[in-house]
Image (cartoon, rainbow, N blue to C red):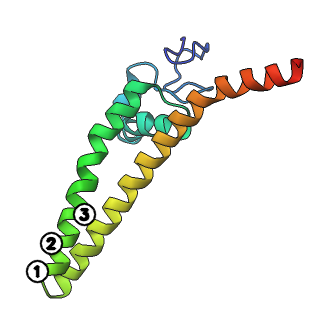
C-alpha cells in the first residue's frame, strides 16, 4: 500500500505510514485508539513540520475563536463572579487559552520559518560564490 502523503510503500495491512505516520487504509479509522491518532494527525503535522498555507489557515480558524472566547470568559469570570467554582472555571479557561495560543504560535512560526529557508539558502549560496 502506498502512503498518499509521502508516497512510501508500506505493507498491505499497515494502518499508518512507517515514514510519516499518516493514516492509510480504512482500518485506521475503525478502531477507537487508531481513530484518535488519526484525528490528531493533522494537528501534529501542522505543529511539528512546516505546514502549507491551507493548514495554517485551518488551524487559525479552529483556534483563534478559542483564544478569543477564553480571554473573554476568563476576564468575565475574574471581574464579575466570586467563589471556588468560578475560580476553577477561570483556570480552565486560562489553560484552554494557553494551549490554543501555543498551537497557533508553533504552527505560524513553522510556516514562516519554512518560507524563509529557501531565500536564506539562496543568500548563503551567493555569499559562498562571491
- Does 96 appear above or below 44? below
Q: Residue at x 24, y 74 (%)?
A: 90
x%, y% of residue 39?
Answer: 36, 36
**Left or right of 63, for residue 48:** right
x%, y% of residue 14?
Answer: 53, 23
**Left or right of 58, for residue 41:** right
- Does 43 appear above or below 21? below
x%, y% of residue 54?
Answer: 37, 25
The residue identified by callout 1 is: 80
Q: Residue at x 20, y 79 (%)?
A: 78
Tag of residue 33: none
Q: Residue at x 19, y 63 (%)?
A: 72
The crowd level at tag 3 (other Cα within 10 Å; few <14, some 14-19, many 20+) is: some
Q: CA distance from mark 2 to mark 3?
A: 8 Å
The crowd level at tag 2 (other Cα within 10 Å; few <14, some 14-19, many 20+) is: few
Foreground pick, 52 / 112 = 112
Which residue extends farthest left?
Answer: 80
x%, y% of residue 20?
Answer: 58, 27
Q: Secondary structure at mark 3?
A: helix
Q: Secondary structure at mark 1?
A: helix
Q: Residue at x 49, y 14 (%)?
A: 4
Foreground pick, 54 / 116 = 116
Which residue extends farthest bottom?
Answer: 83
Q: CA distance from mark 2 to mark 1?
A: 6 Å
Which residue extends farthest front?
Answer: 130
Q: CA distance from mark 1 to mark 3?
A: 14 Å
The residue identified by callout 2 is: 76
The residue identified by callout 3 is: 71
**Left or right of 9, for residue 75:** left
Amino acid at each position: 500500500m502506498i502512503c498518499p502523503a509521502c508516497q512510501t510503500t508500506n505493507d498491505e495491512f499497515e494502518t499508518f505510514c512507517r515514514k510519516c505516520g499518516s493514516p492509510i487504509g480504512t482500518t485506521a479509522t475503525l478502531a477507537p485508539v487508531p481513530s484518535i491518532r488519526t484525528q490528531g494527525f493533522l494537528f501534529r503535522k501542522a505543529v511539528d513540520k512546516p505546514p502549507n498555507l491551507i493548514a495554517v489557515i485551518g488551524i487559525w480558524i479552529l483556534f483563534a475563536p478559542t483564544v478569543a472566547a477564553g480571554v473573554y470568559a476568563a476576564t468575565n469570570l475574574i471581574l464579575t463572579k466570586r467563589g471556588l467554582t468560578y475560580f476553577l472555571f477561570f483556570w480552565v479557561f486560562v489553560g484552554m487559552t494557553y494551549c490554543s495560543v501555543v498551537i497557533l504560535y508553533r504552527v505560524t512560526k513553522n510556516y514562516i520559518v519554512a518560507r524563509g529557508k529557501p531565500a536564506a539558502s539562496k543568500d548563503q549560496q551567493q555569499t559562498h560564490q562571491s
